[in-house]
Amino acid sequence: MGKDGKAVFRIIQKSIRVKEISRIEAGFFNFSDGKSMKKKKLKILVAMSGGVDSSVAAQLLKNQGHEVAGVFLNFWKDEADPHKSANKDCSGESLRDARKVAAKIGIPFFTLDFAAEFKKVVVDYFLAEYEAGRTPNPCVVCNKQIKIGLLLRQALSLGYDAVATGHYLKRLEQNGEVKIYRAKDNYKDQSYFLYTFSQSEIKRLYFPLGNYTKSEVRALAAKYGLPTASKAESQDLCFLKGPHNNFLKRHLKLKPGPIKRQEDGQIIGEHLGLPLYTVGQRKGIEIGGTGPYYVAEKDRKNNILWVVRTWDDNLLYRREFTIKQATWMDKKRPSLPLSCRTVIRYRHDAWPCIVTAGKTRGELKVILKKAIRAVTPGQSAVFYQGRRLLGGGVIQ
């Protein structure tokens, strides 16, 4: 943006009237979560992973008098993994735990096999994005297409009214539309992953944990005697365990190439294949004795990994970027330019920004009030006003 970046931001911002949402922040509206979704009795299918969150979600809905059933989803497992183990969310142990919880609550329980769909939609996408030089967020795609999207279609075909999950976010019905807000538990909030859902989908989805913190959920699980009350959380992607690079090395044809220093263009080492690196990364750049270095750019055309010496090098910061595949939660698209905040990766801070039209069709430009570090192509930029989720898109 150059020297006039802040001035441009202020000028655009002054021209936009941001709607007052203080009533929402103060909890004026009634959220459709585990504490308030009591009016209409529904037939709800709950996605049960065998963890404490989905266990409590099912229990809360049962307590409210809904006709509840639990389902465990079988996903693809990497047979090339020498340990033959995806993370615990996809394991036999998790299936047994989910079944035990369903029995304790007293609800029907069954499984669905989504392995083939998961491999095609999530795993193949994950690998293709890394091969193309981007750093994808497979959880965004999985939630939309498989874990919630495909499950919802299956549930409706089986006669259920809705699907519920243990995601942490708030859902509000207002004037015939559903609004999504950040959860009470800021650290656990998962609204970031659901920005791609349409109104027709979100109206059939419920999230009972939005008004609870993680510690409160565990306390509820203990209160109801659920066997998952003290079960540890998994921090890995559901189709792999451990570092992503081990998975990428098994499934991609990697081509080594030079590592060059941005300041002088000098070759200082050899990378193992560009898909193994991401913008801002320090660990794993095996140069030896001359570091540390941080990834600044991946030149796919020439197979060069460009690095800089310092964590806060200017080359790692961007004040503007573009997104594609933008989607919005409301039926009516917001008017541009739009003043809001953006989150550029899960559990990242929300930064003030202006969203404007891009140079080409299907492209939007995001102008940040302040330059931020490691804006990474392939990740999702998700937009909020206050705590309300507006939409998002994929960073280019």
Image: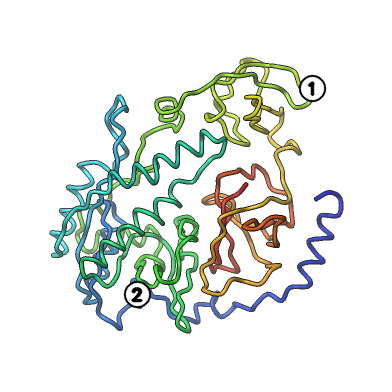
Hey, what amino acid is under mark 1?
Asp
Q: CA distance from mark 1 to mark 2?
A: 60 Å
Q: Residue furthest right?
A: 3
Residue shown at 40%/45% (left/top)?
A: 122
106 displayed left or right of 175:
left
Residue shown at 78%/66% (left/top)?
A: 12
Hey, what amino acid is under mark 2?
Lys
The front one of 74 and 192 is: 74
* Residue 345 drawn above or below residue 20: above
Q: Position of residue 22 (x, y in %)?
A: 59, 78
Q: Position of residue 141 (x, y in %)?
A: 44, 51
Residue shown at 38%/59% (left/top)?
A: 167
Res 222 label: none
Per the image, label 2 sits on a secondary structure element best described as loop
Per the image, label 1 sits on a secondary structure element best described as loop
Task: Name the residue that disc number 1 marks.
Answer: 264
304 displayed left or right of 150:
right
Q: Nearer the viewer, mark 1 or mark 2?
A: 1
Q: Disc 1, disc 2: CB below 8 Å?
A: no
Q: Position of residue 128 (x, y in %)?
A: 48, 37
Q: Position of residue 168 (x, y in %)?
A: 41, 61
- Location of residue 240 (image quadrant): top left
The front one of 212 and 180 is: 180
Within 10 angstroms of label 2, few (less than 14), some, or many (20 or more) residues? some
109 displayed left or right of 2:
left
Q: Residue furthest front?
A: 361
Closer to the chain start, of discs 1 and 2, is 2
The front one of 109 and 148 is: 148
- Location of residue 17 (image quadrant): bottom right
Res 35 label: 2
* Residue 304 drawn above or below residue 23: above
Residue shown at 71%/29% (left/top)?
A: 308
